[in-house]
Structure formats: structure tokens, C-alpha cells
Image (tube, rainbow, N blue to C red):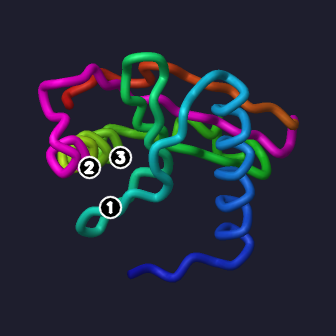
Amino acid sequence: MVAVPIFRRRLGKKGEELALHFLKSSGYTILERNFRYGRGEIDIVARDVDTIAFVEVKSRSSNEFGAPEEAVGVRKQKQLSRLARAYLQQKRLLYRIDCRFDVVAISFQTNTIRLIKNAFPSTC
């Protein structure tokens, strides 16, 4: 396991808390936080009407290295797809419910929160 500097860990935790409140106020029902399977984790699993949303939260203290959502590259997308499938299998929901991948992008520099629904193609 890679050691994460305390600042980054606190920033991520704060971002996840903000994302939770934002999603709830947007009508989402939170089903699970920090779903772990193997070496991976889905930040938030939520229901948006009749769809399961697997939500990745990305927080940035500055935009020096790009926008938060840019950190969800192809490798991360594949990992999230694998984790989503595991979640649906564990809950016996595979092939029974629509799902998608959302990203909550938080910029502490500009004090903005953006919800990107269907951030990448669903393979769950």
C-alpha cells in the first residue's frame, strides 16, 4: 500500500464529505461509502431515481495539475468498472438495474463542486 501524505488524505476526506452533502441535496440516496474490493475502492455508491451511480470524488487544492475530473483516466475507469461489477454481483443486482459512473469534481481553489453524470461509458 502506498503511503498518502496527511494533507492529501485530509483533502480527500473533506472532498468526500462535501460530495456526500452535494449528492444528497441533488436527490441521490447514498447506499454505501468507500466500497472496497480487492485493492480498489469506490468512493460512493448511490441511487439516482432508478439508476445506481458509482461516484468517484476528485478534489484539488489548485488547478496546477489540471481539473479534478482529468484525474479519472482510462486506467481508473477500468478499475471502477471492475469494482462496480463486483458490487452488483455481491448485492445480486447484476443485469437487474441500470448503472452509470459519475464524477464529483471539487476545486478548493475556486470553491466549486461539479457533478459529471455519465462521466465515462458504463460497462457494468
Magenta includes 18?
A: no
Residue 124: image location, x then y, percent: 20, 31
Per the rendered image, the range of residues in magenta is 87-110
Are discs 2 and 1 less than 8 Å apart at CB? yes
What numbered label is drawn on residue 89?
none
Q: In the rendered view, does 9 fall on the left or right side of 78?
A: right
What numbered label is drawn on residue 76?
3
What numbered label is drawn on residue 40?
1
Q: Nearer the viewer, mark 3 or mark 1?
A: 1
Q: Dot 1 lies on which element?
A: strand
- The tag earlier along the polypeptide, 3 or 2, is 3
Amino acid identity at mark 2? Leu
Q: Residue at x 39, y 57 (%)?
A: 35
Q: Dot 3 lies on which element?
A: helix
Q: Dot 2 lies on which element?
A: helix
Amino acid identity at mark 1? Gly
Magenta includes 109?
A: yes
